[in-house]
Amino acid sequence: MSTVTASASREHRITVRSLARRKKRGEKITMLTAYDFTFARIFDAAGIDLLLVGDSLGNVVQGRDTTLPVTLDEVVYHTRLVTRGVERALVIGDMPFGSYQVSPEDAVRSAIRLVKEGGAHAVKLEGGCNAAAAIDRIVSAQIPVMGHVGLTPQSVHKMGGLRVQGRGARGRARVIEEARAVQEAGAFAVVLEGIPAPLAAEITADLCIPTIGIGAGVECDGQVLVMHDLLGLSEWSPSFVKHYANLGALASQAARHFAEEVENGKFPDEQHSYR
């Protein structure tokens, strides 16, 4: 029996406490992004543990070059759609750029909206030491927070592009410091993105909270992928992404087949017409 199936049979609803127990038992955690009811329902039924309503919707849903223009209203809307399709998974609403950087109080207001209006069970925000005060304040408001360190897409301009982080002694020390700051601030888990695998393994062993890797090697406590990458719907994907299906090609084939049948008068036929 697979780890996901075994976990699904034991846990009716994933919670932050059950995730902590998973880390202690050495059981892997699965996480995917979702942006609507249909895919949330599919992934939830498949036994995925965490569904992230990511600000990556700016790239894969809105067709933007970065995640920076995504608004809190947009994430709230998509979170509301996702939570309607979920019975078991923990739904995490991503806090977009500008929704938590101004002040910890502003961060709490944004997080409350994701929970109250979107139905999120938790929120995620990017940053380490610079985000610790916001994490602490949100957690004090009884809202679980997932951190995100390493390659943080909202910092794309500061980093000079989406570059691997944590290389060299200084880079390594910085990412470790940020991950520890996130844990100390009260986060229940942390995403490690775009860092060398040995560094991710070191951080995973060092922290008490689960680590969720993306482009960070196999030793993390769990893994996350953007659903469009998983399903082969993206025109371009990073080198660390694995396509588990090629729905883009299937959708294109279906659309061409539909167009041909309409043009040739084969659709709709009698079976697909009212009498």
Image (cartoon, rainbow, N blue to C red):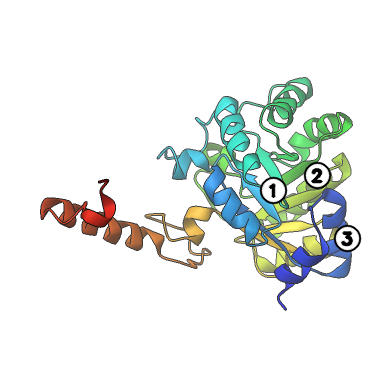
Answer with mark 3 or mark 2, whichever residue precedes in sequence. 3
Is 88 displayed left or right of 260 in the figure?
right
**Quadrant for the N terminus in the image:** bottom right
Secondary element at image label 2: helix
For marks 1 and 3, give the one nearer the viewer: 3
Q: Which mark is residue 21?
A: 3
Q: Residue furthest front?
A: 275
The answer to whether residue 112 is above or below residue 220 is above
The residue sitting at the bottom extreme is 1
Residue at 59%, 33% in the rendered image: 75
Q: For numbered disc 1, what is the local secondary structure?
A: strand
Check disc 1 and report the residue beneath it: 149
Residue at 84% over, 29% down: 137
Q: Which mark is residue 182?
A: 2
Q: Could you tell me if the residues under marks 1 and 3 are in contact, i.e. CB atoms within 8 Å?
A: no
The Cα atoms of the two marked residues, 3 and 2, are separated by 19 Å
Mark 3 nearby-residue class (10 Å; few <14, some 14–19, many ≥20): some
Tell us which disc is closer to us: 3 or 2.
3
